[in-house]
Amino acid sequence: MNPPPFSLSPLGRRRQRQERLAQGVLAGMVLALVLPLLALVGYLLVKGAPLLSWSFLTTNPTQGMRAGGIWPALLGTIYLVVMALIVATPVGVLCAIYLNEYARETWLTRLIHLAVVNLAGVPSIVHALFGLGAFVLFAGLGRSILAASLTLAIMTLPVIITSTREALAAVPMAFREACWNVGASRWQTIRHVVLPNAVSGILTGVILQVSRTAGETAPIMFTGAVFYKKIAAGDLFAYSLRDQCMALSMHLYTVTTQVTNAPEALPYAIAVVLLVAVLAVNALAIALRVRLRTRKKW
Amino acid sequence: MDAPEYSITTRGLNLWYGQFQALVDVSLDIPARRITALIGPSGCGKTTLLRCFNRINERLGYVTTRGEIHVLGRNIYAPDVSLLELRKAVGMVFQRPNPLPLSVYENVVFGLRLHHRRGELPRARLDAAVEQALREVGLWNDLKDRLDTPATRLQLEQQQKLCIARLLPLKPQVILMDEPCSALDVNGTRAIEELLFALREHYTLVVVTHNMAQARRASDECIFMLLGRVIEHRRTEDLFLNPRRPETAEYIEGRYG
């Protein structure tokens, strides 16, 4: 007797089992990624909660960093990140514009591209040594916020170049051709058409570098960050660029490894501050991207 | 008819993409204020040739060009030719409409804004340019109340007409079109073809087309190319009625394509 039409064949049953298996495994992997992340954030929050308060953010550490707040480290991180991006963003974006819009495809530009990609893969401790040699010693900046943020800038530069190039390459070629065919110069094309349409991608790439810069310890350890420095609590301009500074990532390292009898909650609280700050900046990047994308008209 | 006046002349034009020779010894005279169609099978070099006329090919670093192209009597490969001025005079329309992601209005005045200082462009002058250009391509009645809509939201046919309109405020002499109808439906194609005839009065039109029927309907002269060479260049009706070369005959009968 023939089965009725459209009923499942034995092979079909096997394919159905495979389908379920594939879906299960793939969804499981997503869970395996998301759950630990949530667990981590939750764990940090619970452990750090006793210390988290407004004054924790805005006061100096006391009693050999066993009590008090983290103000110098928080402000130091802000200084380092802002300075690093102020330096790296224009250089990186302009460099990417040249590479993507002006430079012709030759062995030299391919070599530069390769160098940029490889530079992005250099371990941060190597950048630290470079910063120590180039900025602290050779340029005579000494161990300072300036030297440390320049080191961080060098470290983020290749990533900014790469993400900016991707954002520029995503602007359709047809727009550029349309411009050239009414006699626009390269620069006019870039300014009137390419940049306005790439700016959301460029900004996202830059802002995502904030989290990376804020989290790095190695490059600043040799070039400008210190264990402890007392500054005017709550004063946003407490550091000058030639000062050394504290930084959140470094502070976290210090209180976990160098300070005996620190309260258990302290490192967790520092980690929460670092994490929340980074998440907030990334959320800003996403919001910005969504906003700019809805303004795009193609 | 008075003696033909030529907008574009090429002499011994050769072009290589790297090692590959895409144009071989092309010598042509393209008459002013006529529609000249470039036909031939895929890869015969017709688009390459078209892209030589405003030197848009050169962006690709591996292109080598030999020979001469005179546009409006000037050798465009002369060292002191300004690419920007050349492209202002020789506009191009592409296969896929490529309006800029701006409003209809800004698309039309885009060229003017590029070539003039801000102070030279009072609102009235821009408005007049928009109206004139849109009237010339037959879009004014449809769009006069929607000049602020993003150009990318228009229908494809309107987008393509807008791309033509975008060239007009710069008063070009030559308009190059690379398969301007291939993204359009039958009605869109007819509308663009009618537009070609209207534009012929003031502009020299060079149109690449894959569509034999279109070349036959909508051109005055026809150039048949094969493997980078010009095989036959004659008045359209002559070329289609009694082609001189066997290759042309075979192609227009549809034996290869």
Image (tube, coloured by chain):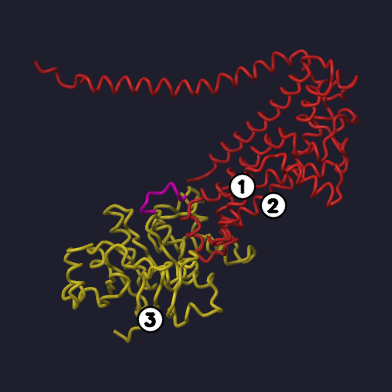
Disc 2 sits on a residue from what chain? A
Q: Which chain is red?
A: A
Q: Amino acid under label 3?
A: Gly
- Pointer 3 residue: B12
What type is the residue that disc 2 sits on?
Answer: Val
Which circle marks residue A91 in the picture? Answer: 2
* Secondary structure under the numbered disc 1 in the rendered image: helix
Q: Which residue is mark 1?
A: A118
Q: Magenta region, mostly helix, strand or loop?
A: helix
Q: Nearer the viewer, residue A178 or B173?
A: A178
Dot 2: what SS?
helix
A40 shown above or below B211? above
| Image quarter of residue B11 | bottom left
Decide which of B113, A24 is in the foreground and name it.
A24
Q: Residue at x 19, y 67 (%)?
A: B252
For label 3, the SS is: strand
State how far apart marks 1 and 3 are (Cα): 47 Å
Subunit bearing disc 1 = A
- Which image quadrant for residue A272? top right
Tell me the crowding category of disc 1: few under 14, some 14 to 19, or many 20 or more residues within 10 angstroms, Cα based.
few
Rendered hue of chain B is yellow
Q: Quadrant of residue A235?
A: top right
- State which region is magenta: B151-158
* Residue B44 picture location, percent across and down: 31, 67
